[in-house]
Amino acid sequence: NAGVMQNPRHLVRRRGQEARLRCSPMKGHSHVYWYRQLPEEGLKFMVYLQKENIIDESGMPKERFSAEFPKEGPSILRIQQVVRGDSAAYFCASSPSATGFSYGYTFGSGTRLTVV
Amino acid sequence: KNEVEQSPQNLTAQEGEFITINCSYSVGISALHWLQQHPGGGIVSLFMLSSGKKKHGRLIATINIQEKHSSLHITASHPRDSAVYICAVGRDGGSQGNLIFGKGTKLSVKP
């Protein structure tokens, strides 16, 4: 029973390129959450998705960032035209249902994005 | 002022010591979470509390809703407890998973 899988673990992009971060939730989990941890700062909520729906994107930057969780396949966090300030660790977590967060959620190991 | 404040920022202890990490928050909450982040970055959920006290092994978490304060205690600390401990709150009325995080307490337990 694999946990939350994030890939790649490390990603290097040049300024202006696109970054795609993938998150496969735990088996049986249909809700995914993305968080960002900037260097020397705390974690910050970005977006909460259910399959084919964005439930809460209040933490997403207004430009260049988007997220999806299709019916089939992993959730994708996409950052267009990356800048140095996007360098951070990006974590996803998953839970089994709309109230499942109260009963248990699991984090992935994160993707470390470095923009050069 | 941050909505979630943790103290201390850094803590060094000798193996076997009793450890307390504090968390204060300034918003109405639906629940408070304690997380552990090891070097290398993996994050583990330790506790979710909305009232009272929870215990798991050598870890104890308490919350005082009236005082908007929570504590995480580690009894008989061990070097493997060395990690960053993070307090996070779910805002009352907010969506699940939309947590406000403290900056973390870095714990180092010396043998």
Image (spheres, coloured by chain):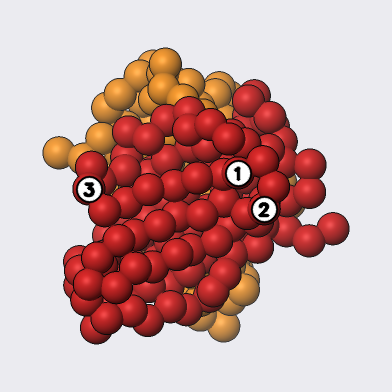
Chain colours: A red, B orange
Q: From the image, tell me which residue sits under label 2.
A: A73
Q: Nearer the viewer, residue B68 or B36?
A: B36
Residue A116, quarter of the rendered image: bottom left
Please say if the residues under marks 2 and 1 sit with CB atoms less than 8 Å apart.
yes
Q: Is residue A84 visible?
A: yes
Q: CA distance from mark 2 to mark 3?
A: 24 Å
At a point 27% along the width and 81% down the height, the residue shown is A14
- Which quadrant holds the N terminus of chain B? top left
Instruction: Name the N-terminal-most of marks 2 and 3.
Output: 3
Q: Is residue B79 above or below residue B42?
A: below
Q: What percent of the width, then of the height, locates residue A92?
A: 53, 53
Q: Around disc 3, counting alpha carbons within 10 Å, would you say few (fewer than 14), some (14 to 19), or many (20 or more)?
A: few
Q: CA distance from mark 2 to mark 1?
A: 6 Å
Q: From the image, tell me which residue sits under label 1.
A: A70
Q: Amino acid at mark 1?
A: Pro
Q: Nearer the viewer, residue A81 or B110?
A: A81
Q: Around disc 2, counting alpha carbons within 10 Å, would you say few (fewer than 14), some (14 to 19), or many (20 or more)?
A: few
Q: Amino acid at mark 2?
A: Gly
Q: Secondary structure at mark 1?
A: loop
Same chain for mark 2 and mark 3? The answer is: yes
Check the residue under mark 1 and report the chain it is in: A
At a point 59% along the width and 64% down the height, the residue shown is A6
Q: From the image, tell me which residue sits under label 3.
A: A63
Q: Is residue B8 visible?
A: no
Check the residue under mark 3 and report the chain it is in: A
Check the residue under mark 2 and report the chain it is in: A
Q: What percent of the width, then of the height, locates residue A31?
A: 62, 37
Same chain for mark 1 and mark 3? The answer is: yes
Q: Nearer the viewer, residue A49 or B48?
A: A49
Side (left or right) of B87 relative to B80? left
